[in-house]
């Protein structure tokens, strides 16, 4: 089955360290099972997540995530076939800072929802470069 990637944003509902740890544990456990890799940029006011893997698994994962009541306003930015994994080494890379994206005021003014597919893709390729791991074989 072909490789697929999706990027969505959402707004945390009741964000704290315990909840974030719970989300990351759920994500990594399920992603290892489902052959999904990716990255989660997270802050008190925003989640931005890159998911990649077999097309059906990415779709199923997105459907489960959309029903999760730990966030709201799930908005899909990118859904496209891919030729290779960008985050092959990570069941879910976690980037807590994300200060280089938008200010809190910009997020509150819906900058994320207005961003282009190219812009959100570029945030993750920057993150991938910064994470400094070897390229997948
Ligand atoms: C911001 C956020 C990111 C998530 N990321 C993933 C993920 O990458 N993979 C995944 O399987 N579940 C992820 N989840 C959790 C799912 O919503 C769900 O709890 C999990 O897939 C287990 O589903 P199940 O209880 O139906 O097995 C995420 C949830 C949130 C709120």
Image (spheres, helix red, strand yellow):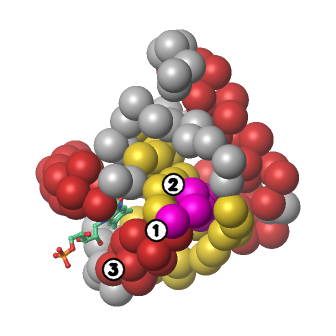
Front tag of 3 and 2: 2
The number of numbered discs placed on residues in the rendered structure image is 3
Where residue 15 sits, quadrant-wise, is bottom left
Magenta stretch bounds: 1-6
Secondary element at tag 1: helix
Please name the residue shown 70% across and 66% down the image: 80
Sort mark 3 into few (<14), some (14-19) or many (20+) by Cα contacts within 10 Å: few
Secondary element at tag 2: strand
Sort mark 1 into few (<14), some (14-19) or many (20+) by Cα contacts within 10 Å: many
Gap between marks 3 and 1 measured at Cα: 10 Å
The disc label shown at residue 52, or none: 2
Sort mark 2 into few (<14), some (14-19) or many (20+) by Cα contacts within 10 Å: many
Residue 27 visible in the picture? no
Secondary element at tag 3: helix
- Whether tag 2 and tag 1 are in contact, CB under 8 A, the answer is yes
Q: Does ligand 1 reach within 8 Å of label 2's beta carbon?
A: no
- Whether tag 3 and tag 2 are in contact, CB under 8 A, the answer is no
Question: Relative to 73, does residue 87 appear above or below in the rendering?
Answer: above
Question: Relative to 103, does residue 61 appear above or below in the rendering?
Answer: below
Gap between marks 3 and 2 measured at Cα: 15 Å
Question: Relative to 61, does residue 129 appear above or below in the rendering?
Answer: above
Question: Relative to 37, does residue 134 appear above or below in the rendering?
Answer: above
- Residue topped by disc 3: 64
Where residue 27 sits, quadrant-wise, is bottom left
Q: Nearer the viewer, residue 130 or 84?
A: 84
Please name the residue shown 46% across and 68% down the image: 58
User: x, y (%) of residue 14?
Assistant: 29, 68
- Residue topped by disc 1: 58
* Residue 126 in the figure: left or right of residue 38: right
Please name the residue shown 68% across and 62% down the image: 81
Q: Does ligand 1 reach within 8 Å of label 3's beta carbon?
A: yes
Front tag of 3 and 1: 1
């Amino acid at each position: 089955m072909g490789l697929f990637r999706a990027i969505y944003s959402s707004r945390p509902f009741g964000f704290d360290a315990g909840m974030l740890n719970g989300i990351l544990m759920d994500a990594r456990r399920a992603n290892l099972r489902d052959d999904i890799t990716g990255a989660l940029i997270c802050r008190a006011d925003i989640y931005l997540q890159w998911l990649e893997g077999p097309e059906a698994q990415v779709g199923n994962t997105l459907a489960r995530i959309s029903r999760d009541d730990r966030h709201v306003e799930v908005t899909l930015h990118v859904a496209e076939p891919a030729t290779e994994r960008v985050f092959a080494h990570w069941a879910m890379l976690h980037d807590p800072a994300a200060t280089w994206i938008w200010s809190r005021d910009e997020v509150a003014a819906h900058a994320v929802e207005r961003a282009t597919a190219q812009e959100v893709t570029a945030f993750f390729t920057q993150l991938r470069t910064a994470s400094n791991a070897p390229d997948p074989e």
